[in-house]
């Protein structure tokens, strides 16, 4: 096992006695390695067991917070347990949305489809409350950048833009992961929060955390998080340590 950075281990140790405690995490790039095919984004080895152990601790709630729809997140992760599920960047809170936004979503997808189809390797993903343009598998970097710019320009001003790693997501509701985690914190009356994330959309959470909370950035890049680990393998190590401290 890779050693957890000393400053992060000390922060987790200090937080471990606080209850109720919320431990929340993004999925892709954090609990699962980033892959070209989102349907193949399976948890890193040992992660499911480590997460379940954290969730089993008294007074601890584990939440999965993702840009994916809740049903997709449940399916691809295979996680089962007493988890809270927050999908579509907070638009889905513990369950799928009703169908009232489907018409707007489908019209947006139809508008973007010709742009995406014209770029080899690009992919259009239709989610419950958003449409995402993926360019991770586009070999022509200039074409990928042009496609994201075209999708951005085509977006209705009422949409919320969520740029990420090789993706632009257009969300039908004005929500973000930060407001979702804050809502969950207040609902639980949490005395402390741990949050793990890797993408630009996770920065909304890091900025919403209090000075005694623990925000953990996964991978490179500027961040408002106070701590950093390299990859999903090190995330697993953090979860194993957290399980030891909380047991």
Image (spheres, rainbow, N blue to C red):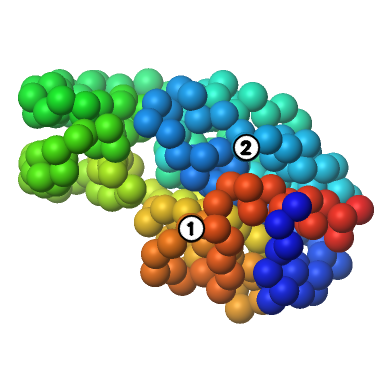
Judge whether residue 55 can be spotted in this image. no
The residue under the point 56% across, 21% down is: 75
Q: Would you say 72 lies left or right of 94 here?
A: left
The x and y percentages for residue 132 are 28, 34
Q: Is residue 14 above or below residue 163?
A: below
Q: Secondary structure at mark 2?
A: loop
Compare residues 231 and 153 and report the one nearer the observer.
231
Q: Secondary structure at mark 1?
A: loop
Total number of numbered discs in the rendering: 2
Residue 52: numbered disc: none
Mark closest to the chain's N terminus, 2 or 1: 2
> What residue is disc 1 on?
219
Compare residues 151 and 29 and report the one nearer the observer.
29
> What residue is disc 2 on?
44
In three-dimensional space, the C-alpha distance between marks 2 and 1, rounded to whole angstroms, equals 15 Å
Q: Would you say 2 lies left or right of 68 here?
A: right
Q: Is residue 107 above or below residue 26?
A: above
- Mark 2 crowd level (few <14, some 14–19, many ≥20, 10 Å Cα): some
Q: Is residue 8 above or below residue 133?
A: below
Judge whether residue 12 can be spotted in this image. yes
The x and y percentages for residue 105 are 25, 27
The residue under the point 52% across, 69% down is: 225
The residue under the point 37% across, 21% down is: 99
The x and y percentages for residue 67 are 43, 40
- Mark 1 crowd level (few <14, some 14–19, many ≥20, 10 Å Cα): some
The residue under the point 10% across, 39% down is: 143
Q: Would you say 98 lies left or right of 180 here?
A: left
State which quadrant residue 135 falls in: top left
């Amino acid at each position: 096992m890779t050693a957890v950075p000393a400053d992060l281990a000390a922060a987790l140790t200090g937080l471990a006695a606080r209850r109720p405690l919320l431990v929340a995490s993004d999925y892709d790039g954090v609990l699962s390695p980033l892959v070209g095919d989102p349907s193949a984004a399976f948890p890193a080895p040992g992660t499911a067991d480590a997460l379940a152990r954290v969730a089993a601790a008294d007074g601890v709630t584990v939440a999965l917070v993702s840009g994916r729809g809740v049903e997709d997140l449940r399916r691809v992760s295979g996680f089962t347990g007493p988890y809270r599920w927050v999908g579509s960047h907070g638009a889905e809170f513990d369950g799928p949305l009703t169908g009232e936004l489907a018409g707007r979503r489908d019209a947006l997808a139809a508008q973007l489809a010709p742009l995406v189809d014209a770029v080899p390797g690009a992919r259009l993903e239709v989610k419950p409350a958003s449409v995402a343009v993926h360019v991770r598998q586009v070999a022509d970097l200039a074409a990928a950048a042009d496609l994201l710019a075209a999708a951005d320009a085509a977006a209705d001003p009422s949409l919320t833009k969520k740029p990420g790693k090789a993706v632009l997501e257009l969300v039908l509701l004005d929500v973000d992961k930060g407001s979702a985690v804050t809502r969950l914190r207040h609902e639980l009356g949490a005395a402390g929060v741990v949050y793990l994330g890797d993408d630009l959309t996770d920065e909304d959470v890091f900025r919403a955390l209090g000075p005694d909370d623990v925000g953990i950035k996964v991978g490179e890049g500027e961040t408002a998080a106070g701590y950093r680990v390299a990859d999903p393998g090190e995330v697993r190590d953090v979860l194993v340590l957290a399980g030891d401290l909380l047991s």
